[in-house]
Amino acid sequence: MAFSGDGATLATASYDGTVILWDVASGEQGRTLVAGSPVNCMAMRPDGGMVAAGTLDRGIVLLDTGTGSELRVLEENLGFPVSAAFSPDGRTLTIGYWDQALRLWEVTTGKQIGNLDVDHPSGVASAYSWDGKLLVSGDRTGTVRVWELAG
């Protein structure tokens, strides 16, 4: 699950390959987005305009929350995605993988812009600081690492 930056929308992902948008104030179900494969992890861009769905066999699918359309697939067959996080400005998407990888993607171009060797034993989760200057990675063992981001 993920909230939009203003807290007005909640997105929930499902193993049936869909992401459902909810109006938080009314509790009513909104648009259903289709990722086309079971969704294992997801993130919502802070402005609420996009959802990144980490799927089991299609890679990372970017979905437009306004139209419901698929914008692009960032990757295929690079591993099993277990976590997703957008930077505060919404321009970078970080995906954590079961195989100890943490990859950074430029959302507008779909290009991979970084690959951190995080050395976590299994399944990597990540989060950005509010100002986007720090990236934190963690795993199920409780190990946490802090990364300073350039630029």
Image (spheres, rainbow, N blue to C red):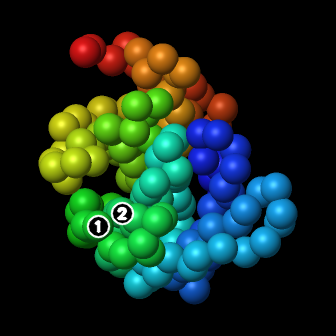
Where on the picture, by quarter, is residue 75? bottom left
Nearest the eye: 46 or 14: 46
- Mark 1 and mark 2: span between their CA atoms? 5 Å
Is 35 rendered above or below residue 72?
Answer: below
Is 41 rendered above or below residue 58?
Answer: above
Tag 1 secondary structure: strand
From the viewer's perspective, tell me whether residue 1 is left or right of residue 95. Answer: right
Q: Residue at x 59, y 76 (%)?
A: 31
User: Are circles 1 and 2 on residues that touch, CB within 8 Å?
Assistant: yes
From the viewer's perspective, tell me whether residue 95 is left or right of residue 15. Answer: left
Tag 2 secondary structure: strand
Residue 119 position, x and y percent, is: 40, 33
Residue 46 position, x and y percent, is: 51, 41
Where on the picture, by quarter, is residue 16? bottom right
Q: For residue 62, which numbered disc appears in the image?
A: 2
Is 114 rendered above or below residue 9?
Answer: above
Nearest the eye: 126 or 91: 91
Q: Earlier in the sequence, mark 1 or mark 2?
A: 2
Dot 2 alpha-carbon crowd within 10 angstroms: few under 14, some 14 to 19, many 20 or more: many
Q: Residue at x 60, y 39 (%)?
A: 5
Q: Residue at x 22, y 48 (%)?
A: 108
Given the image, on which type of amino acid does mark 2 rest? Leu
* Rendered-image quadrant of the N terminus: bottom right
Dot 1 alpha-carbon crowd within 10 angstroms: few under 14, some 14 to 19, many 20 or more: some
| Residue 59 in view of the camera | no
Given the image, on which type of amino acid does mark 1 rest? Leu
Q: For residue 71, which numbered disc appears in the image?
A: 1
